[in-house]
Amino acid sequence: MPPGATVADAGEFGLISRMVDLFEMGEHVLVGPGDDAALLRIRKGHVVVSTDLMVEGRHFRREWCDGADVGRRAAAQNISDVNAMGGRAHSLTVGLAAPADLPLAWALDLARGFAEECRLVGASIVGGDVTRADQVVVSVTVLGTCTVAPVLRSGARPGDVLALAGRQGWAAAGLAVLGRGFRSPRAVVEAYRHPEPPYEAGPAAAEGGATALIDVSDGLLAEAGHLAEASEVAIDVRTADLDVAEPVAAVGAALGSDPLQLVLSGGDDHALLATFPPGVGLPEGFHAIGTVAEGSGVTVDGGAWEGAPGWTHF
Amino acid sequence: MPPGATVADAGEFGLISRMVDLFEMGEHVLVGPGDDAALLRIRKGHVVVSTDLMVEGRHFRREWCDGADVGRRAAAQNISDVNAMGGRAHSLTVGLAAPADLPLAWALDLARGFAEECRLVGASIVGGDVTRADQVVVSVTVLGTCTVAPVLRSGARPGDVLALAGRQGWAAAGLAVLGRGFRSPRAVVEAYRHPEPPYEAGPAAAEGGATALIDVSDGLLAEAGHLAEASEVAIDVRTADLDVAEPVAAVGAALGSDPLQLVLSGGDDHALLATFPPGVGLPEGFHAIGTVAEGSGVTVDGGAWEGAPGWTHF
């Protein structure tokens, strides 16, 4: 293929074979890409499955993220959903709908990004589909397994400790500066492009007795709201225990807004929010950020939060 | 919701809950939609997985298919991929990207179509995602299981019998008349809107000793080509043994073209193409349509076919 070749130049099967060449298959992949379906060996008697879509112009922009960034972000978002059950991802499928003039190099970078993020957790890309569309849509399904019982959103009990693992507000700060045409602070821009979800924290939470678990993809307060609703409890978040990192604070100052808003409503870092019974030591990576009580809804330092709780998809 | 409500009126979570209300969960679904991921009980030590995208304007048009048609077609196409491994589908995930002004009724009809097609094989919709996009994109991942060893594309041997199960050319004839602004013959238009894949034929082929198996989604000759390539054999199709159904013949006559072209290059009926060792009785639903020999490539009645072999995605 010449430099500047498009996905249409490569053709459906050329594009697929070039993408698949970038993927490594784990030993559990008995039949990988290329047949009507993939065949996976499943050692435990269950599978955890989740699916997500990322749409150009809504979840990413090609001027802000190269193909590898989009691939890493799409893979991270899905692997994080298995993390949020207390599990480990082992297999992903990837659907790519794209305009005919999408540069082939972008699509192959996307595949490289997927491969890089999957390598972090030992997961394999086992199948997929490519087709033409007006805008780029990346569809991912992840399969995984739990070593102990999965941790749902619905198990939080009054008296539990609310705890967080992973960074919060970094990706939201990165998105905020990119949206205003800036490229710095570099640390938050990189955090938006390459989230670093706490992949060890999900299984650690499950093994450590977490009563409820969710990943923060739509905003900390929004996800706390999902936990509170599913568990039929009230949740209070203590801002004094939230880490407002220096580059996040700098973005808040530069934008003339409260950096806590970035921490409380930001998604895309894929932090984990968990509840643990009182008196249980928190697993490595978690720190307490609030409390669970009888009642309903989410408060911040005992009162209502005036800002936005998070992100909405329609 | 008032009549004429859109998906944006329903909102992300309103849309999801209305769709999920239309789905039935099988007993293997330990955790269904609503948590970070679904949890499925897997009795056999493996899972078969495949994924497909359907894009508005490319794979369907809203003026030709209502939401339920698109749901049935999308589900059928994916269930057929498990059928083509000799397996049975048990679970699907569905991603829906759609413009904000998509009628809510269309999205709920889509969910109904998925539910109807899944009911035919006892499969459950266990998870999904909805988000906004410029055009409707439906992304599906199917999980399934095989009762005996899965049948790949690569096992055909010289001397094997080539056999077909299911209708061929019906959906292509329906698409051809819809594309010219007609709505009849009704039988082929219905075949395009509601494919009837031979779901029993996949497991029957596997149990009956098929050496290779593929489903016809891109055209009979195109899929025969995939089989021939993967198995490193030559395949010859005998047109005298192909069933040119009366409404397909009528469409060919009306369009002034050879109806065999519809049978040989049509997809979307999701027929199954298999090879069996010589002398083995063919399972119910299959009939012989050709031969496998040493060599490579696909011939029709011993010679080259001048028409198109099938459909291309870029």
Image: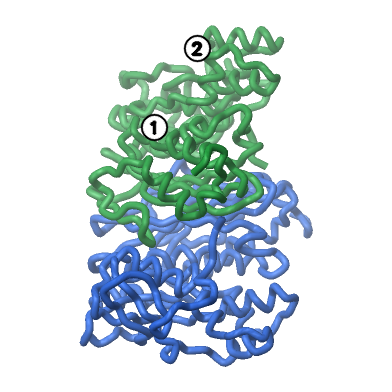
Chain colours: A green, B blue
Secondary structure found at label 1: helix
Q: Is residue B306 left or right of residue B301?
A: right
Identify the residue at horizontal 44%, vertical 76% (top origin): B271
Chain for numbered disc 2 = A
Q: Is residue A304 left or right of residue A140?
A: right
Alpha carbons under labels 2 and 1: distance apart: 28 Å
Disc tally is 2
- Considering depth in this image, is A218 or A268 the residue closer to the camera? A268
- Disc 2 marks which amino acid? Asp
Secondary structure found at label 2: loop
Residue A247 appearing in the image: yes
Q: Badge 1 local density, few (<14 within 10 Å), some, or many (20+)?
A: some
Chain for numbered disc 1 = A
- Considering depth in this image, is B178 or A298 the residue closer to the camera? B178
Q: What label sits on residue A108 in the rendered view?
A: none
Q: Looking at the image, is B36 positioned above or below residue B219?
A: above
Say whether disc 2 or disc 1 marks the residue closer to the N-terminus: 1
Identify the residue at horizontal 23%, vertical 68% (top origin): B148
Q: Badge 2 local density, few (<14 within 10 Å), some, or many (20+)?
A: some
Q: Is residue A179 left or right of residue B21?
A: right
Residue wearing tag 2: A243
Residue B20 appearing in the image: no
Q: Looking at the image, is A229 positioned above or below residue B298?
A: above
Residue B35 position within the rendered picture, expressed as x and y whole percent measured from the top left: 47, 43
Q: What label sits on residue A116 in the rendered view?
A: 1
Residue A72 position within the rendered picture, expressed as x and y whole percent measured from the top left: 46, 32
Residue A265 position within the rendered picture, expressed as x and y whole percent measured from the top left: 60, 24
Q: Looking at the image, is B149 positioned above or below residue B99?
A: below
- Disc 1 marks which amino acid? Glu
Mark nearer the viewer, 2 or 1: 1
- Quarter residue A155 falls in: top left
Identify the residue at horizontal 64%, vertical 48% (top origin): B14
